[in-house]
Image: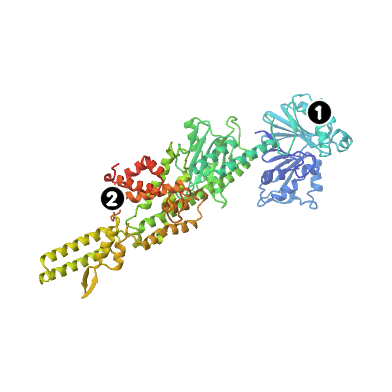
Amino acid sequence: MNYLKILGSSGNKLKNFGTTSFQISNDTTIDAGNIINSLDDEAYKINHIFVTHAHLDHVSDIPFMLDNYFTKREIPLTIYGSLETIQFLKEHIFNNKIWPDFSNIKLLNKDENTLLFKELKENEEIIHGKFKIKAIKTEHTDGSFGYIVSKNSSSYIISGDTDFNDNLISHINNTKNLKALFIECSFPNSLENIAKVSKHLTPNSLKMVLKKIENKNLAIFLYHLKLVQQDVLKKEIENLGIFKNGGKILEDGDIIHIDNLKVQSKIEDIELFDRVMDINLKLSSENDKEYLYEMILTLIRELTKSDAGTLYLISEDKKHLDFKVVQNETLNIFLGTKEEKISWNPLPLYLDNGEENRAMVAVVCALDKKIINISDVYNSKDYNFEGTKAFDKSKNYHSKSMLVVPLVNHENDVIGVIQLINKGIKDKNSIYTSYDEKIIKALSLQAAMALTNTILIDSLENFLESFVNSIANAIDAKSRHTSTHITKMAKLAPMIANSINEDKTIYKDINYSKNDLKEIELAAKLHDVGKISIPEWVIDKSTKLQKLIDGFELIKLRAEIIKRDLKIEFLENKLTKESYEYSLQNIEDSLEFIGKANIGQEFMSDADVKRVEDISLYKYYENNIERNFLSDDEVYNISIRKGTLTKEEKDIMNSHATLSYEMLSALPFPKKYSNIMHIAVNHHEKLNGKGYPRGLSEQEIALEDRILILADIFEALSSNDRPYKGVKKLSEIFKILDFMVKDGEIDKDLLDFFKNSRAFKEYCETELLAEQLDV
């Protein structure tokens, strides 16, 4: 790639203006006025500097290049220039007075001096890497040079500081394939006298130079403009009309692509910055893990103009790189999406013998935490690309340039690797530049942060769900009779919500998101969390007389004692046969009545309560002590009007809702699940305001609450695994629910919807017995 990056272009040194320095390749510049500020951490890679002359604005960074990067330098910094320029640098800078003489200081661990000087003769041309560089005499100081730089079939001239001079014009007219002239223009015409004395050009003298140039299609680029009266100077340059063939007044940061004279300016850098910021915003706002993987690779590929790429993530056991996304624009391959999964084998980080796998470039990138830039895969000897070549052969593709970047998180751990292939696929010779590396490095940090955040959120989500499941399992395990209640609730409630999402009638405007559905599910799992504190004998009180054992068994034993005593009295002729048989039957009837009342399935009327009190007065003898057939506590329990719990026991049981409120209120649920507490706690509220624990009004009970209310009641009524109560048919269940609607307890619209919903059908098919399905 033949380009020229403008590190500094100004005639003055200020905060945002760097003095003359042009980067012609990764390790070479012409002049050193602004290398460090412009290249920052990459400045140490500069190993060759061609100096036009020894004025400070052209050499000021050289001393600091040696000092700043001394420990990083592996080869000498070589300065090229005329004899006069080199003598000046040695005598007046590297003299151990102004600055240490690095030409006599050895590199660390190497027997070479840190600084080398190479003298160039006028018109001498040297081969420098892929370039030919020729020194030409200019009119400025003793030994001042300009340079002709040639690569492939294109050349350009950098004039250095100069006044009008025929030698420069001669070289311009006699250089083959000359594409561009980079020439100074320092002062406005009004300061021509100063320009003459200091040997610089003005627009007028520049015009004289350009008139003598034979190639009228030459692109002209101007630099070294002094800040004094710069607006006037720019206006005078504009009046010359010299940029019709391309060219411009250079700015720091401009990149000139010599072959096509395309200019990548600071404005493009700003646009690139805007794109990078836009990508950062997109990455930081995406929470869907799989879509984030795809987005990272897509956006980075687009920004670097890469034809193909792969995103790998480190496996949980830290032993492999797993393929997550694979993309190839040319081949129309897009794997790793939600629709197209990847089944390729992961790349092992370590060999079977435990040694590092140094053959695969992506693995080395991860192990060493370094960017790897390969200009031609097929010419690389450092890594094994047999897999890449086999892929190319099978797909009739050709992989050339490659950029491999580690994704490093805030703890300096590698969490993945991005591998980009074929920069600028339309330009077969394009390679990834250090500029690409800088961009991708910044983006990789943001991508790693986004991935880390998503992984962290995902792990917290898993932790939350595991915690909730543990609580739900603990609640289910607390009662042998309701051991599947939470599980079924967590199934039914989201099913109802999903059916509402599908509705096109009364709920057509309701749309529960994925997070909303998960919130309802978690609320269902936590709705009875307060029962953790409820004693088992209350939760499991399946009959009115249930304690550690069913108290009805004791009553049956007393009845046997009475029947025994009656028989003795009959045998002793103290009772007639008729009285004996009547008394036996009375005991049997009373026992049967107590037994039915004990189950608690039927409402106890006043007459029933009175009968209990009468039965309690039956007498029996225990250890010659006369006792009542039923104790006061047994009378109190058997006389429970509805259900099996006394008022005190109901208060204990109902307290679970208040305790649930207190427990769930104390938990810091994430924002997307902020309604879990309300949905879970409100499952005992009623539309008529008579529910608990808060006695909410109809307006205060949200649709999500009503879903849980209905699911809780329906599951309890339809349950077929509770031995203390009979199995109800659907007709019976809906009769009870309809009465609850009539009493203003539950939502009529929701119940009517539920009866005809997919949720109802699917739940009944999987959770109810065939004998229950009578509607």
Q: Position of residue 91 (x, y in %)?
A: 81, 47
Q: Nearer the viewer, residue 541 or 250?
A: 541
Q: Nearer the viewer, mark 1 or mark 2?
A: 2
**Viewer-proximal residue, 424 or 103?**
424
User: Looking at the image, which is closer to me, 26 or 176?
Assistant: 26
Quarter of the image with the C terminus is top left
Give the number of callouts.
2
Residue sitting at x 27%, y 65%: 613
In-image side of 79 versus 500 (left or right): right
Horizontal and vertical percent for residue 82?
A: 79, 39
Q: Does residue 58 appear to the left or right of 774 in the view shown?
A: right
Residue under the point 87% across and 36% down: 191
Q: Are marks 1 and 2 in contact (CB under 8 Å)?
A: no
Identify the residue under disc 1: 239
Query: Is there any visible trace of residue 558 in the rendered image?
Result: yes
Residue 267 appears at what percent x and percent y? Answer: 69, 36
Alpha-carbon span between mark 1 and mark 2: 99 Å
What amino acid is at disc 1? Asn
